[in-house]
Image (cartoon, rainbow, N blue to C red):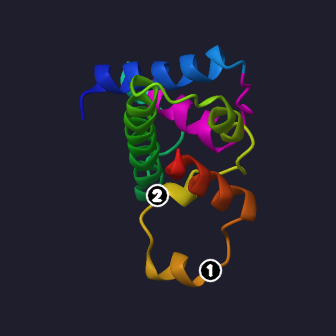
Amino acid sequence: MDWKELGERSTYVRDLARSYKVMLPPSEGLALALHEADALASGAKSPLPATDARAAASAHDAHVIWALADSLKICVDAGIDLKAHIANMGTVPQTTELLRPLTRERSTSRTTTTKSSSWRTSFASA
């Protein structure tokens, strides 16, 4: 992963949200993923003890921002108005977990919310 590119993608997502005047709740999923991506891009060291779970979460957050920036840029370049979709990004519940690959454990759990599901469906149809 190119750390400079990750930082640029994080900035792109933040700037796009800002351009639509969308406030991303600072202690929730997307804002936390952006914060982690920024920390990785800048080479900041975490004050927390290193664990496999934290490394996996950090990699997941970086991947979410990398992929999301790709998708958003494609839509913006195609002239699609994403204002409603970006506004929904600020209201999705506290996790980016829905963007993880489906595992057997996740496929049998009922953690997906209606709001999150409808956001993913409406974004995919844009």
Quadrant for the N terminus in the image: top left
Q: Is residue 35 magenta?
A: yes
Start-end of magenta stretch: 22-38
- The correct choice, above or below, for 90 with respect to 113 in the image is above
- Which secondary structure lies at badge 1? loop
Query: As displayed, is residue 22 above or below residue 19?
Result: below
Q: Residue furthest left?
A: 2
Q: Nearer the viewer, residue 35 or 22?
A: 22
Q: Name the residue carrying label 2.
A: 53
Decide: few, some or many residues near mark 2? Use Cα within 10 Å; few <14, some 14-19, many ≥20.
few
Could you tell me residue 58's position as x and y percent?
Answer: 44, 44
Please state which of residues 46 and 97 is positioned toward the viewer in this rendering.
97
Per the image, the residue denoted by label 1 is 109
Can residue 62 be seen at all in this image of the molecule? yes
Choose between 125 and 39: the one closer to the eye.
Answer: 125
The residue that appears at 66% across and 67% down in the rendered structure is 112
Residue type indicated by callout 1: Ser
Report the residue at 50% width, 34% height from top. 36
Q: CA distance from mark 1 to mark 2?
A: 20 Å
122 or 33: nearer the eye? 122
